[in-house]
Amino acid sequence: MGLLSKIFGKKNVEERKDEPDMVYVPGEDERMNWAIEKANLTLWYFEESLANPQPHHAYFSVKVHIIDGENSEHIWLTEPHFDDEGNLFGTVGNEPVSVGTVKLNQKIGIDRDLISDWMSIENGRLIGGYTIRAIRDGIPEKDKAEFDSSVGLYIDEGIDYFRPNADTPEGAILALENAYNAKDLEAAIACKDFSEEARIMLSKLKMELDDDIINETAEVLKLSFINSTEEHGFPDFSGLQNAFPERKKIDDSHWVITEICWFPDGGKSTQLLNTYKSPKGWVVLGLAETEE
C-alpha cells in the first residue's frame, strides 16, 4: 500500500483491519484552516527542496483542491513539479471520493493557488504535512500511537520554514532570533515595538494612558533592552530547529504564538510569545510564558 493510501484509505471515513479509522477534519475546522494557511506560508521551502533535492529527502507530495461543479475535494499529488510560471504538475495519488474530473494515477496540471498542503520526508521525519497533523490532532489521544504506526511516519511537531520577516507573527520571531545570532542590536530593536509594550504594561497597572507617559515608558523599556543586551550578551539561537504549532488570537493586531525549539544538544523548550501587527509589520513584544 502506498504512503498516501496508508494515510487516507479510499474513503473519507474508512474502517480497516488493524488500522485506526481515518477521518477528514471538516474544511471549516479551525485547525484545518490554519494547516492550509501554514502550508501556503511555507510553500517556498518545499519548492526550493523540490528543485534541489538532497540525500536526506525521501519523498515529496502536494495536496490540491479539486473542484468539480458543486463538489470539491482535497487530493494528494505524487511526483510533483513546477513549471517556469509556477504552475503545478503531478500524479493523482489517492482515489477521489467526491469528484469525477480526476482519477487515481492520472497526471494533471493545476494552478498553484489551489495548493492546500505539501509534505516531504527528511531523515524519516515528516516535514510539512500540516493537514495530516490536523487530522491527527482531531483523533483521541489513545489512538495517536496507532495512527503513527499505521502511517509509518515519525510525526512530531515538525520544523516550520516561515520566511524570517515582518509578514507573519512567526516570521517576526525568526527575524528577531536571526538578529540575536548576528549580534545586530539595531536589527533586534527593529523587530520590537516598545510603545506597544509600554501601552500594554501600563494598562495592566490600571494607569491612565496618554501619549507622553506611553512615550516615556517606551523609552525606558528600550534602554532597558539595550542595557540588558550589552550586559548579558545576545541570546544564542544558532543551530535551533523551530516549529510553530499554534496561534492564539487576542484581537486582530495581537496574537500569542507557540514556539517549540529543538537545541543542537537534543534539548527542547516550548514558549509562548506575544506578537503585534504594527504599522511596520509584525513585531515581537516579549515572552508570555515559558514551559521547559
Image: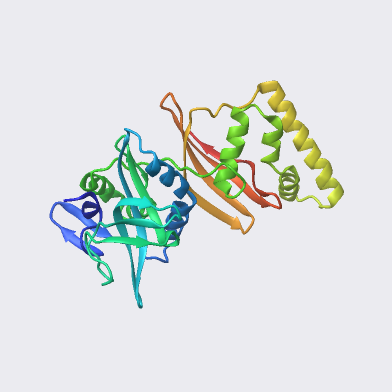
**Residue under the point 19% across and 50% down:** 2
Q: Nearer the viewer, residue 201 or 95?
A: 95
Find residue 150 and report its horizontal and vertical position in percent. 21, 48
How many discs appear?
A: 0
Find residue 282 and report its horizontal and vertical position in percent. 63, 48
- On the picture, is 163 further left or further right than 267? right
**Residue under the point 43% across and 28% down:** 267
Q: Quadrant of residue 13?
A: bottom left
Q: Is residue 56 above or below residue 139?
A: above
Determine the residue located farthest toward the bottom in the rendered image.
70
**Residue under the point 36% across and 60% down:** 64
Q: Quadrant of residue 223?
A: top right
Determine the residue located farthest toward the front in the rendered image.
84
Q: Nearer the viewer, residue 120 or 227?
A: 120
**Residue under the point 54% across and 29% down:** 237
- On the picture, is 191 further left or further right than 141? right
Find residue 160 and report its horizontal and vertical position in percent. 45, 43
Is there any visible trace of residue 25 in the rendered image? no
Is there any visible trace of residue 189 in the rendered image? yes
Determine the residue located farthest toward the left in the rendered image.
17
Q: Quadrant of residue 57?
A: top left
Find residue 231 and report its horizontal and vertical position in percent. 70, 21
Q: Nearer the viewer, residue 55 or 139?
A: 55
Question: How is this picture coloured?
Answer: rainbow
